[in-house]
Image (cartoon, rainbow, N blue to C red):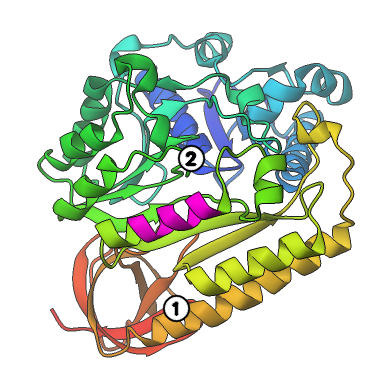
Amino acid sequence: MKTRTLKKDKVNIITLGCSKNIVDSEVLYGQLKANEFDVTHESENDDANIVIINTCGFIDNAKEESINTIIRWAEAKQAGEIDKLFVTGCLSQRYMPDLQKEIPEVDKYFGTTHLPQLLKTIGADYKHELIGERVITTPGHYAYLKISEGCDRPCSFCAIPIMRGKHISKSFEQIETEVKHLVKHGTKEILLIAQDSTFYGLDLYGERKLAELLRRISDIDGVEWIRLHYAYPSQFPLDALEVMAERKNICKYIDIPLQHVSDNMLKIMRRGITRKRTEELVQTIREKVPGIAIRTTLIAGHPGETQQDFEDLCDFVRINRFDRLGIFTYSHEEGTHAGKLSDDVPQEVKEERAAIIMEIQQEISTEINKLKVGKTLRVLFDRKEGGYYIGRTEFDSPEVDNEVLVDAKINFVRIGDFANVLIESAEDFDLYGSVIS
């Protein structure tokens, strides 16, 4: 048991879930630092006496991880290893009464919009003048930038509107301020994120303004890469593609979660699009931005998914040959439209279908990677690990996509720098090469 002292409080922030949660934790970190708190993020030293857990409540696995983490730190508090435990984020927003009842050891629970209240509870003031400023927890050369909050889409399977509320865009000026702050502190790659980035500006300016936002960010000195994530396919703003094609510092990359392709499933999922329009959009993206890498995510085993629906999805993946692809097994979420339906696809079938899709994608990824052998690619290096410098091309986002490895014994690069790499060999999801300049 720790001995109580008069030592200054130290706060350890633990982040679970998606990149949007990372940004929220970074804002919290910045606010606490401005209040002269000693703060750390996911410290391995266990030397903090206050722990704040930023939870995820999106799907079953994420909820389980969040609950297990809360329980672990609740037990640490009971053992006297920490003094205070606070929980915030999506899980807390969605299940606060249940959590208060089941894990009362937590000092207080907060929702996704309760940052000022959380700070006040800890003894800190919310500093409005810190708009655009936060402490980056990713490697400093890249940072996520949230361009909006919430979502107005009616997707059957998604609980995000329950946890995050309606769509609210940040203004051009606020985003530009954030980007300039990041660049000033060494950030080279800006990863644009939102629940739905294509909705950007509709609430503020009366029309979708993603294209103009891309132009404005592209014009800021020091921004070397801009990467677009989470673009909803229905009513996609095609003018954004023209900007992506003309601006050299906008990566030829788009993350566009399609979720499914059979008309039956798209209707049940309430996606507002058909297979025909989906295929036309994929073709248009490739025509307007030649060489673009398209990343998508899919769902296996949503209520109502038949074997024929699944076979249609497999055919779609084979035909369209996405550069990057991930797939989730459906998670039955209370409060959602699909939560009222019968969860009629057995879990083992969901997992089998997801595995089949990934086998198809693995073959596609291998073939695409082999075509890169002998080419020279610009690579941004993220880290050194296991005798290799590891980086990414403009076609790859951190954590989820392919990587480029160069042997550290015969190459030298600085982490956070770009270098040209001659690709010499390829595996399913990785490339190997040598630095040539």
Image coordinates of residue 119 in percent, x first then y, are: 51, 14
Q: Around disc 1, counting alpha carbons within 10 Å, would you say few (fewer than 14), some (14 to 19), or many (20 or more)?
A: some
How far is the residue under mark 1 from the one under mark 2? 32 Å
Residue under the image location 29 percent in, 25 percent down: 132
Does 282 appear in magenta?
A: yes
Quadrant showing the C terminus: bottom left
User: Which amino acid does the dot numbered 1 rest on?
Assistant: Asp
Q: Range of the magenta residues? A: 276-284
Residue under the image location 48 percent in, 30 percent down: 24
Q: Considering depth in this image, is 98 or 294 the residue closer to the camera?
A: 294
Q: Quadrant of residue 134?
A: top left
Image coordinates of residue 154 in percent, x first then y, are: 62, 29
Image coordinates of residue 173 in percent, x first then y, are: 22, 21
Quadrant showing the N terminus: top right
Q: Around disc 2, counting alpha carbons within 10 Å, would you say few (fewer than 14), some (14 to 19), or many (20 or more)?
A: some
Residue under the image location 88 percent in, 25 percent down: 102
Q: Considering depth in this image, is 31 or 10 the residue closer to the camera?
A: 31
Q: Which residue is mark 2?
A: 234
Q: Considering depth in this image, is 417 or 342 the residue closer to the camera?
A: 342
Helix, strand or loop for disc 1: strand
For the stretch drawn in magenta, the main secondary structure is: helix
Q: Earlier in the sequence, mark 1 or mark 2?
A: 2
Q: Which residue is mark 1?
A: 430
Q: Quadrant of residue 372?
A: bottom left
- Judge whether 310 appears above or below 30 on screen: below
